[in-house]
């Protein structure tokens, strides 16, 4: 831009023009990824389809955590609890009331939103590591509450609940695994679109302002308490829906699968994928599902050590996650193409 | 009444270990502003080294000293090799590095020494202290060692030049560097001391919880809880917090009927969260104020 536009309309038009090719590339990437996702079940085995379904489920759960941690700056080690509540809500509804599996998702989401919102109220008082401990308390308590004897009539106690795999609608030439894959993909796409719109909206900018400088955000008139608790609820909703999808896919829920280690997995996925990056969350799901298996296949005894080494290597190579790495690579590439007009963003990245 | 006294004393004995872990956690936290998630695994590894030395026929105290010394060097090595290169990385990335270290140490210990439960000797004996049933000599020994270490640390940080330099490096790294303190090495030293304290805690708790690769998981969680309850900015507070957690946990397990024993971790955590809601920076912690 040689002449800075003087009126705001001109400025916006100029911004639009300069942003267009980038946006075009982004839509192209989204379209290509969706096309690949739609075609995959045609070539993959049922086990791989099942694994990919779980990748999407974990990706959705990590996206929930990302809304809270990445966009709003609140730390949580308690998302295994929200995932567990979502899974159990779906399982109990299907087991006790004959509700169709697709109706359990909004129910799980609503329950988790409520629990998350209520938990967000005391969390307002706490920051950083203190919030981490409070949310950790939730994660530690959840398996014990699920095993709690007076609730056994609903939760099935230590044994958990076994579910039946949903059949594809009559007339579709799909097996149950393929149907579940497409069902999960559809839910995922809707929720991804919701998250992307949220991040680009006035509300999303308010969330990020709270993350970056809470006092300045409050001074600008943002109701920080309301937004923070709402984000807690929304984040729990995303993770809870993921939990419900996970329960339907695995066809089984048991208290000890929703322990603290699951929260750690979500956190690993969040950081490896990229904090505050929506596609990064999906990459995180991929990492969380496949890398432990890869480590296991290299050496059964030392699987944990190999997993740890892989984690360290990833952190050393791309400290801001896959999304940060891609941004860095794109900035480098555009600078290489036009060495004298490096964008400010590119210069900033280079300076890191 | 005797039951109450007995449970409080038993709680204090466990609390001594939590206090040591909390202290180790706070030392690294003061140096680098992070909770060391691998603290417990470092302590577990040190305890296994001591166990191996005893198996090879070394006397207890030789093994004890060797393990503490090796932990000190190991802590420094971990800081230099792993955490120095990424000290500018985002906070969450560093957290993942801690989780990676946790996973590596746990898995290696399992591979070298396998997962069967081993007994670990105590130098104090397990007999009742003074012929009373209130507390065993080992429990009394745990409290005694914890108090001695806390005293020594207090003297070190208050009275020695090196202790002063370490405090300066933690409180204000830039100014400390300007007056000639080698801040990087002070941080490494903090890691070494924290690893050594962790090793002592591991060797003291091992006779009670038995030696196996996952033995420190619960202990570390209580240590964290103690550190946060007392306030992460206050070493003395961390110690008080650790003792308090031990007592709360024991009393909840004994006196709350029906679900007390099953849910004692949850109850202890609920108590902590309740306290934090009243004092968000911990009981003895300072709230960090920032200029806008």
Image (cartoon, rainbow, N blue to C red):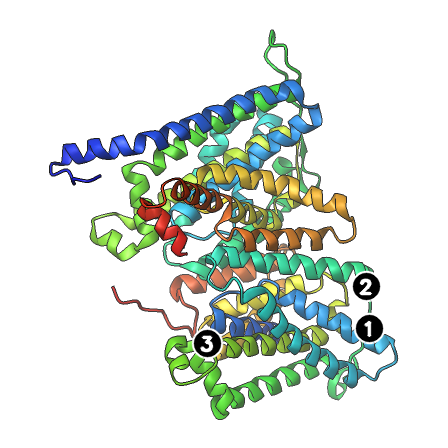
- Between the C-alphas of marks 1 and 2, the distance is 9 Å
Where residue A290 sits, quadrant-wise, is: top right
Q: Position of residue A203 (x, y in %)?
A: 30, 39
**Going 70% across and 83% down the picture, which residue do you hit?**
B141
Q: Are marks 3 and 2 in contact (CB under 8 Å)?
A: no
Secondary structure beneath dot 1 equals helix
Nearer mark to the viewer, of 3 and 2: 2
Label 2 is found on which chain of the structure? B
* Among the 4 quarters of the image, the one containing residue A14: top left
Front one among B267 and B138: B138
Q: Is tag 1's residue or tag 2's residue first in the polypeptide sequence?
A: 1
Q: In this figure, which residue is indicated by the disc labeled 2?
A: B113
SS for callout 3: loop
Residue hosting label 3: B234
Q: Where is residue A81 shown, x and y percent of the image?
A: 54, 45
Residue B197 visible in the current orientation = yes
Q: Is residue B164 above or below residue B263?
A: below
In what element is the residue under mark 2? Answer: helix
Q: Residues within 10 Å of mark 1 (few under 14, many from 20)?
A: some
Residue B52's disc number: 1
Local packing at callout 2 (Cα closer than 10 Å; few below 14, some 14-19, many 20+) is some
| Residue B138 falls left or right of residue A33 | right
Above or below, A149 against A133 in this view is above
* Disc 3/disc 1 C-alpha distance (Å): 35 Å
* Marks 1 and 2 in Cβ contact (< 8 Å): yes
Seen from the viewer's position, the closer of residues B259 and A260 is A260
């Amino acid at each position: 831009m040689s002449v800075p536009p003087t009126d705001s309309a001109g400025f916006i038009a100029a911004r639009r023009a300069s942003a267009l090719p980038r946006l075009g590339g982004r839509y192209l990437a989204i379209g290509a990824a969706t096309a690949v996702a739609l075609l995959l079940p045609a070539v993959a085995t049922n086990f791989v389809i099942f694994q990919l379904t779980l990748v999407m489920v974990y990706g959705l759960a990590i996206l929930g955590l990302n809304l809270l941690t990445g966009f709003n700056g609140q730390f949580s080690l308690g998302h295994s609890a929200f995932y567990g509540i979502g899974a159990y809500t779906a399982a109990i509804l299907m087991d006790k009331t004959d509700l169709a599996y697709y109706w359990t998702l909004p129910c799980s989401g609503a329950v988790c939103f409520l629990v998350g919102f209520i938990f967000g109220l005391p969390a307002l008082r706490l920051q950083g590591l203190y919030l981490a401990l409070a949310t950790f308390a939730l994660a530690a308590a959840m398996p014990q509450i699920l095993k709690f004897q007076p609730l056994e009539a609903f939760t099935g106690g230590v044994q958990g609940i076994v579910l039946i795999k949903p059949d594809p609608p009559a007339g579709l030439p799909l097996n149950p695994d393929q149907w579940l894959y497409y069902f999960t993909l559809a839910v995922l796409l809707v929720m991804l679109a919701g998250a992307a719109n949220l991040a680009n909206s006035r509300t999303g900018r308010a969330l990020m302002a709270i993350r970056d400088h809470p006092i300045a955000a409050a001074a600008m008139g943002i109701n920080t308490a309301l937004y923070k608790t709402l984000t807690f609820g929304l984040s729990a909703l995303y993770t809870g829906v993921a939990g419900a999808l996970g329960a339907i896919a695995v066809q089984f829920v048991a208290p000890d699968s929703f322990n603290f280690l699951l929260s750690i997995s979500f956190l690993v996925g969040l950081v490896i994928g990229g904090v505050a990056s929506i596609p990064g969350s999906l990459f995180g799901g991929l990492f969380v599902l496949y890398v432990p298996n890869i480590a296991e296949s290299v050496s059964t005894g030392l699987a944990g050590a190999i997993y740890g080494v892989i984690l360290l290597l990833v952190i050393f190579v791309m400290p801001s996650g896959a999304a940060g790495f891609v941004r860095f690579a794109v900035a480098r590439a555009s600078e290489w193409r036009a060495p004298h007009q490096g964008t400010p963003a590119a210069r900033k990245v280079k300076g890191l | 009444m005797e039951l109450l006294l007995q449970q409080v004393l038993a709680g204090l004995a466990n609390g001594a270990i939590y206090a040591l872990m909390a202290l180790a956690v706070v030392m690294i936290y003061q140096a680098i502003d992070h909770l060391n998630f691998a603290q417990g695994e470092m302590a577990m590894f040190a305890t296994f080294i001591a166990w191996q030395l005893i198996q090879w026929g070394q006397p207890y105290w030789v093994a004890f000293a060797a393990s503490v010394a090796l932990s000190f060097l190991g802590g420094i090595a971990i800081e230099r090799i792993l955490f120095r290169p990424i000290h500018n990385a985002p906070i969450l990335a560093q957290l993942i590095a801690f989780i990676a270290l946790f996973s590596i140490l746990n898995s290696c210990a399992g591979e070298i020494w396998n997962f069967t439960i081993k007994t670990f000797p105590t130098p104090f004996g397990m007999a009742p202290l003074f012929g009373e049933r209130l507390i065993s000599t080992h429990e009394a020994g745990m409290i005694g060692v914890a108090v001695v270490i806390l005293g020594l640390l207090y003297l070190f940080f208050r009275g020695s030049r090196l202790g002063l330099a370490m405090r300066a490096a933690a409180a204000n790294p830039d100014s400390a560097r300007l007056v000639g303190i080698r801040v990087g090495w002070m941080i490494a030293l903090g890691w070494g001391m924290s690893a050594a304290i962790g090793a002592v805690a591991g060797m003291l708790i091992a006779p009670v919880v038995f030696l196996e690769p996952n033995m420190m998981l619960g202990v570390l969680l209580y240590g964290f809880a103690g550190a946060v309850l007392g306030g992460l900015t206050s070493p003395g507070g961390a110690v008080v917090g650790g003792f308090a957690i031990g007592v709360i946990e024991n009393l909840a397990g004994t006196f709350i009927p029906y679900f007390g024993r099953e849910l004692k971790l949850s109850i202890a955590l609920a108590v902590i969260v309740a306290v934090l809601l009243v004092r968000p920076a911990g009981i003895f912690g300072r709230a960090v104020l920032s200029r806008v």
